[in-house]
Image (spheres, grey):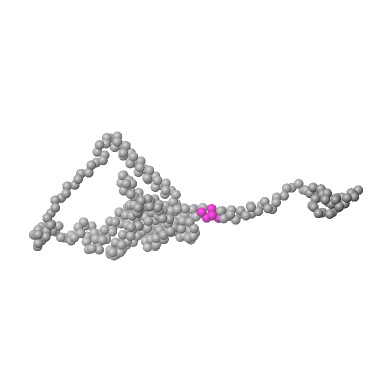
Amino acid sequence: MRSKHSASDEDLLPFGAPQGDSGDFAAPAKRAPASSGIRQRSPLALRPLWYSIPFLVLALLVATYLIGLTLWSRSSLGHWKAQEYEAAKAGYEGQMGWTSVGIEQWVAHYNLGTTLLTEESVDEGVAELRTAFELVPKSIEVEPGRLESSSYECRVRANLGRGIEMQGDAKDAEGANLDAYNLYAEAEEMLSPCQTPANQLSSTGTDTNPADRGKERTSDKKQKSDKKNKGEDPNGDSNGDPNEDPNKGDDPSNNEDPESTPSPSPTPTPTPTEDPFAGENGDQKQRREDLIHQNDEHNRDQREQDDKGRSGNPNGAW
């Protein structure tokens, strides 16, 4: 039986019924279809997963690129160690294309230039090493004018200096002494910042820094080229005529004006240098030598540890 207060009955709504619905609530409601019992996931919940797929694909591509490049570089290094230089050169040339944009662009140029120098293609090798020198990350100065000898920059400097020295050797063989001198000077300047400081030189006499050996070698060749430019004997110590009597200048009778001849000054007596280890006993001497040996071992181990992280020949990155 419907209430007599029909107007007020419109405001009497059960919980969940929309307001303003003037329908007949006495009519039986339609039943919702029975659920199958399977819980369905909302499409909105899957949206973050779909958004992350491009990032996952990008990460996979980058990982594939880096791993593939590392394996490729190690394969080329294996060819280089086996003296299969043509195969190594082909690998490094291919790697140049894949690293022309991105990280470590200098490594392929460095490896290719080193391989070309090994094959005695000097000019081409120097050109590649100059490109590597422009691209390599610059080292921080450990002291004014001195770089860390195990840095990437010094690795490039060492091989580039060697290549320029080889160009100087070719000019020297052609008799172009001035060109040879300029090339030796450039090689010396390239190697100088990477020399080992004097206080860190090995007391055993073994030199593991290629810049030290290259600097000494190019300095000697530069001096000989300079003597050749002046028409002097490159193997002689005298700056004058090798056939000239060395006692001629000491005889006053050879000088027309005796008064212009300076009086000989007495030879200064060298001041003896005190031995700082003169007062040490046998145990102290042994301890000092052990400390020096430990320091040398530490420096060598540090260099070897730094080199282990550089694959790609020789001592490249990746």
Measuring from the top left, give residue 90's x and y in whole percent.
Answer: 45, 59
Measuring from the top left, give residue 200's x and y in whole percent.
Answer: 33, 46
Q: Is residue 97 shown left or right of residue 174? A: right
What is the tally of numbered marks visible in this picture?
A: 0
Residue in view at x 16 percent, y 60 percent:
243
Q: Is residue 37 above or below residue 261?
A: above
Q: Is residue 72 shown left or right of residue 232? A: right
Residue in view at x 17 percent, y 47 percent:
269
Q: Is residue 230 shown left or right of residue 143? A: left
Q: Is residue 83 visible?
A: no
Measuring from the top left, give residue 152's x and y in whole percent.
Answer: 41, 53
- Residue 55 on the magenta span: no
Q: Residue 127 sits in which quadrant?
A: bottom left
Judge by depth and name the residue closer to the eye, 263 or 110.
263
Q: Write down the region rendered in magenta.
A: 61-66
Q: Is residue 159 shown left or right of residue 103? A: left
Residue in view at x 81 percent, y 54 percent:
20
Q: Is residue 277 visible?
A: yes
The rendered magenta stretch, by its main secondary structure, is classed as helix
Residue in view at x 28 percent, y 64 percent:
178
Measuring from the top left, give residue 123's x and y in whole percent.
Answer: 37, 63
